[in-house]
Image: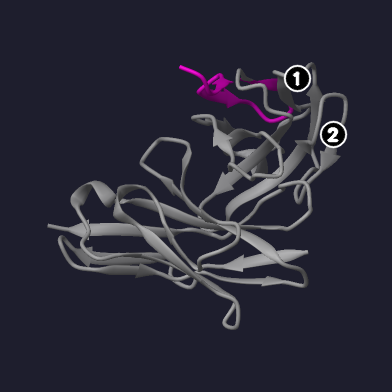
Amino acid sequence: AQSVTQLDSQVPVFEEAPVELRCNYSSSVSVYLFWYVQYPNQGLQLLLKYLSGSTLVKGINGFEAEFNKSQTSFHLRKPSVHISDTAEYFCAVTSRGGNEKLTFGTGTRLTIIP
Amino acid sequence: NAGVTQTPKFQVLKTGQSMTLQCAQDMNHNSMYWYRQDPGMGLRLIYYSASEGTTDKGEVPNGYNVSRLNKREFSLRLESAAPSQTSVYFCASSALTGTLSGYTFGSGTRLTVV
């Protein structure tokens, strides 16, 4: 079984400032990792994923995340945020070789301050 | 547009009433999932179906039943609704090809049980 911890439930950031949303996972086997974004009153959209290879993964809308196996982390970053980035962000994990059943974190609400 | 369609978008039920949430995908995906989203708890898996004809319990299956009617459709039934089932329900699908393209989510059903 695996679990995901998103350490911050809310993150306020000024527009054009950098942001990091933290995600740590726990698993007894190798994993695949994902970040999803949920805009207000919408479903979730895939932002980026780590399957294998380079530990730095680039996603849509200028976001990137770095897989750190030793720290069991997959933090999401953006160098300069915009008002349109206001949303809730979910980290998710699934075990390699499993049935792609995702376990989600509790989410981080990113609020951009003009 | 291709994707996952959920109906209805909103529903209010009285305690003890029953209803079925409908979900259909047109991407020829093998796997389908039902999640509920509650504040501060992220998304929790209710049931999933790895392929047509199979269903399995997730993290919070009590009070729910599912039917994988065919490859496209996966319904969620509340036999006797309770206030604790007030939530936003999301259906999702995935290809289960080993490439982990991620989930495609529907836009959600907001259910209130009074």
- The magenta segment is B1-24
Horizontal side of B86 relative to B1 (left or right) equals right
Q: Name the disc covering residue A91, or none.
A: none
Chain letter of disc 2 in the image: B
- The residue positioned 67% from the left and 34% from the top of the image is B95
**Amino acid tagged 2:** Thr
Q: Nearer the viewer, residue B87 or A56?
A: A56
Residue B98's image quarter? Answer: top right
Q: Name the disc covering residue B71, or none.
A: 1
Give the structural element (helix, strand or loop) at label 2: loop
Q: Position of residue A52 (x, y in %)?
A: 60, 61
Is residue B7 highlighted in magenta?
Answer: yes
Q: Nearer the viewer, residue A110 or A76?
A: A76
A57 vs B84: above or below = below
Residue B32's image quarter? Answer: top right
B12 vs A109: above or below = above
For the N terminus of chain B, the image quarter is top left
**Amino acid tagged 1:** Lys
Q: Position of residue A33 (x, y in %)?
A: 58, 59
- The residue positioned 51% from the left and 19% from the top of the image is B2
Q: How is the image coloured?
A: one colour
Chain letter of disc 1 in the image: B
Identify the residue under disc 2: B55
Horizontal side of A43 relative to B27 (left or right) equals left
Q: Nearer the viewer, residue A87 or B87?
A: A87
Q: CA distance from mark 2 to mark 1?
A: 12 Å
For the C terminus of chain B, the image quarter is top right
Horizontal side of A10 relative to B39 (left or right) equals left
